[in-house]
Every structure is written in structure tokens, then in C-alpha cells.
Amino acid sequence: MGEEQDMIHAKGQWNDWKAEAEKALKGKSVEFLNSATYEGITLKPLYTEVDSDFRQHFSGNDHRATNDWIISQALFAEDSKRLSEKIVAAKKRGQHSFYLKNFSFLKSKQDAKLAFQQIDWEQDSIFFDIGEELGIISLFLHERLEKNELQTLKGTLGFDPYESLLRNGKSTISLQTQLDYLADTIKWCQVNKCHVRCLLIQGSLYHEAGAHSLQELIYTFSHALDIVNELLNRGISIDVIAKNISFSFAVGSVYFMEIAKLRAAKQIWASLIHALGGSEPSQKIYLHTMNSTFNKTRNDVHVNLLRTTTEGFSAAVAGADELTILPFDSVLSDSGEIGERIARNSQFILKEESLLSKVVDPAGGSFYVEALTTELAERAWKEIQEIDEKGGFLNELIAGIPQKKLGIILEKRHADLNHRNKIIIGTTAFANLSEQVTEIKEVKMKEKNRQQVKPVGSFQDALLAVREKADLPMIKSMGEEKELQIQPLKQSRLVEHFEQLRTDAQNYFQKKGHHPKAIVISFGCLKDYKPSLDFVTGILATGGVTVEAIPYDQFQSISNEEVIIFCGKDEDYKSIHSSLITKLKTANKKVHLYIYRNGHEEKIKEFGFEGFLSPNMNAYTFLVTLHHKLGVRN
């Protein structure tokens, strides 16, 4: 009876708030304030118990004893000695887990010994994403076996058998060979009582392809279910499989949606393991998170600091087990130690000053977050089951279904960006033209000299090769398997096309000695035309184009300018005389005339204007056109 009374009370409060809100909206329905997400979820301005019965989820969503997490910052090094030095420096600054993705410098046991000699295997842990360098596992595990450190080894030493397929459309090592290698590794670790996790499910792959949160959950766990079934078929129990998996998710800037996504992931994994007959301890997911690179920018790069901090906050609130915060300048070619230091210290601030590690599931009980979590989990679980019933996720990938759906969302994201429905500070809005545009970071892996290394096809053969030659073994595909090919995921950053505009404008500056420029003719006094002028100036700045503003009453003639934009209120345009336009076109046959605001079709037709600027315009298309007219692009 008490719960029923609470529900009645909540509905009464909602009705009272709705009445007051609609009064303030002057008769408009409160639904006017609703907004839609890429996931197809309608967000409301207010959530109550009517929307989410938090008692069903609160305290049942996460069985963690604390909200603490492992600080696992990425280390970037080009040789074993430098990596060892970076590990020492990181440990002095309080870091005790080390994220590593580039192993190009490891060629032998000696290299591995030098690189990792400063790690305390009793206290420290690792998060090694080895990609297709499968030989690293055998090299590393054999080194720990010889030093009797296997049983103290903690963390993730793993790979995702689908990663290369998803990134490149094909794998250099066949999928079946990778799955066999993974299964043998897990069995060997079981026998030798090594508790390192060997399977790394890369949910971040879908995020970086533009997926929304619901797609990330559907594809990540469908992807995981495929691999789990393959391992079950290779004689490994569900409980053993579960404790050998780490999930790595990218975290974006949509704050509450990202919290809900990670909380929903816990529910989905628990449901999946339960459905496969796993024990309750196996239903606890191991979550590693890393900042999204999809939303990062190389223009006004310090804004990335805000993005990485709020993303880290989302992950901590959602209860991630391990956190990697990327340096704010990680996308630049000249990224440095200051970025790494700030990234590491951001975690200490979240943990020690914000005290996020002290409260388990701090978002629990929030009607808004609980409603989002429940909707994501339920909708994702339904689609995961449907994909499984159709034959599994790999069949979907071969048919190109996920790739097509991801492409649709990516197009919507670009359309919203181009039309300024969404803005990216420093790139598509509030661009700083005095900023020197920096080139994008390109990671070039060193080629290994492996002419003398005989390829092997299994984990056991790889261990034997390490024992006999102490070199990094090369893994090859076993058998005469037909090469599997799919359409790869399109990995990109959201603003790359806008960044290219700025690069082109900078190249123009280096050749000509000045920035591309447009003339803006303003009307009336400053207070009348400034909002319009600011809008036009802001749009052009995102393309690296400067503006020279000239009042209409001071304007005489311009013979050598190629782009002129008339900017004022609607009534101001009545004062534009046809003789002025004729004079402009006579003086310069190449002049291009535009007007601010739409709804002036008659003026455009009368004076031969080439178009108009407006708040809902496709800014990107306009800027590309402008670049061609100004000679920035050929």
C-alpha cells in the first residue's frame, strides 16, 4: 500500500509540475520540451517514479564493495629502454597499471625483460592490448613462468579475434587460428594458475565508427557472444570463459547517456551469462574504459581537456573497473609529456578530490539515469537475442548489416554537424583563426626483422619457439582456410572534414601570405547588425576565412574582392540599389554576392545573388563552395 501511495503522490507531483510548465510555455504542451537521441529515445524535461521504479535496480545493478577503479594510463614508447623509464616515472606518480598497445619494439625475451623489469608483479597490473601480435602472449607468459611470477600476474594480456576483421575487412591471421590460439592460451593459464584475462572485447570499435550507445551495446555483446560460443565449442566452461574476458568501451561526451550505457552493459552481461548457465560470480563484467577519439579535435586542442575530464567522470560514476584517460593532445603529431601528466592527474582528482571512489553506483536511484539504463538494456537485450537466432553476429557482419546501420548514424551525425544542429567548440563554432593548425598524429610502427623467425601455428608451438630461440614467434594461419572478408568499419573522427577546411586555408596563407577573406557589408548601427555579423564571422572562421566589415553608408566600390556578403535586418535590404550591384559586377566579373538570412528570394533573383547564409544552412557545403570561389581549393 505504501508503494501505491508513493506512486500516486509522484503522479500528482508530475501533474502539478506539468500544469506550471505549460503555463510558463504559454499554452504549449510540455512535450514541446522533449528531445530525441540518436538511439531513438525520447528525453523528457522531468523524470519521476512513474518513469522508473528505481527500487527494482538500485543496489541490484552492481555488487561491487567499493567504487574504486584501477588507474591504467597509456604508455607510449619506441624501444624497451624508454618504456622501462616511462614505467618508473609513472609509478613515482602513483600509477600501478600500465596500458600498452604498441609492441613493435619487442623482438625477444631480452627486449621483454628490459621493458618490464621495473614492474612489481605483486603490486602492479597490466592492460596489454596485443592486437594481432599473438606471439607477445607466449613470449610474455614464458618470461613470467621462468621467473615463477605467473600466479601473481594480474590484469589483461589479451586480444580481440574480431578486431582486425572489423578494422581492415580481413585478418592477417585467420579467425579460426586466432580462436584456437585463444582457447589454448586460456587452458594453459588454467593449468598454470595464471589469472590474467586473455580475451579483450573491443566495444570501442563501434563507438569510433560513429555508433550510438544502443548500437554499441548490441554489437559489442553480440560480438562477445559469438566468441563465447566458439570457446564453449572448444571445451572451455562458461565460468572459465567469463573470468577471462575484459570489455573495453569508449566513453563519449553525452554525459548521462554514457553513464547509462556502462550501467546497462553490466545488466546485459549478467543476463547473457545467466542464460548460458554461468554462476553468479561470473555475471560480473570487467569494464575497461577509454576516452572516445571520435569526438576529439586538433583545433583548439585544449578543449579536449574538458571532454576527457567529463568522460572520465562518466566512467567513474558508472562504476568502471579500469580507466584510461587519453592526453588532451593525443591526436596531434607533437603531443608531449604535459598531456600525459594532466591525463594521469585527472584520475587522481576524480578519485581523491571528487571522492567518486567512495560511493558505489552514485547514479543509482536517479529516475533519469535509471530510465535510460533500463531502456538501453532491454532494447539491446532484445536485439542481441534476435541476432543470435539469425545465426550470430559474424553472419550479420558478412551480410554488411551492422556496417550499413552504422553508416546511417554516421551520416546523421555529419548532417547535424554540417547544419549546426550540433556544434564542436573550437572547430565548428568559436574557431580561433590565430591558432596554428597542427597536423594529425600518425603512428608508424617499426618493422620487425623476422627473416630468421620460423612461423608457428599454435600457442603450444609458440611457447616451444620462445623456449628454444628466445625470440618473438610469428603466428601463421593453420590449415587451408578460405579467407574471410567483410566490409570494414569506417573508423574516423567526427570533425575531420571541417579540420581539412582549416588546413586548406592555412596552406593558402603560406602560399599567398594572407588569409582568404570575404567582405561583409553591414547596415545601420552596431547594435542592429552585430548579431548577424557575429554569426557570419563565426561561420567563415570555421573554414579559415577572415572577414572585413564595411558599413553600407561607407561602402563605395571594391574591384578586387571575390566574395561579398550583405548582412543586416530584413528591412535593411530594401535600401540596396540595383546600380550598386551593377557597379560591383562591372568592376569585377568574378565577384560572388551573398545575403544573410533566407526568405529573400526576390532580392536574390533581382540582383543575381548566388545564395544566402542562415542559421539552418549547410555550413560545410557553403564553406567548400567559398573555398573554390576564393581559390583556396582548385
Image: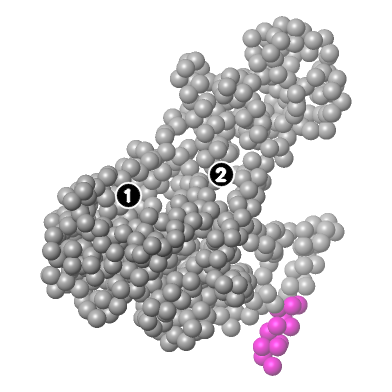
What is the quadrant of the C terminus in the image?
top right
Mark 2: few/some/many CA within 10 Å (<14, 14-19, 20+): some
- Image mark for residue 395: none
Indicate the position of residue 575 as horizontal and vertical percent values. 83, 18
Q: Is residue 328 left or right of residue 269?
A: left
Q: Tell me if residue 60 is in the magenta stretch.
A: no
Tell me the amino acid under the disc marked 1.
Glu
Count of marks placed on residues: 2
- Write down the region rendered in magenta: 1-12
Task: State the predominant SS element of the stretch in magenta.
Answer: helix
Task: Please give the residue where the numbered disc 2 appears in the rendered image.
Answer: 424
- Image mark for residue 340: 1
Q: Tell me if residue 6 is in the magenta stretch.
A: yes
Per the image, label 2 sits on a secondary structure element best described as loop
Tell me the amino acid under the disc marked 2.
Ile
Indicate the position of residue 162 as horizontal and vertical percent values. 44, 62
The residue under the point 23% across, 65% down is 462
Is 72 in front, or is 8?
A: 72
Q: Quadrant of residue 91?
A: bottom left
The residue under the point 17% across, 57% down is 471
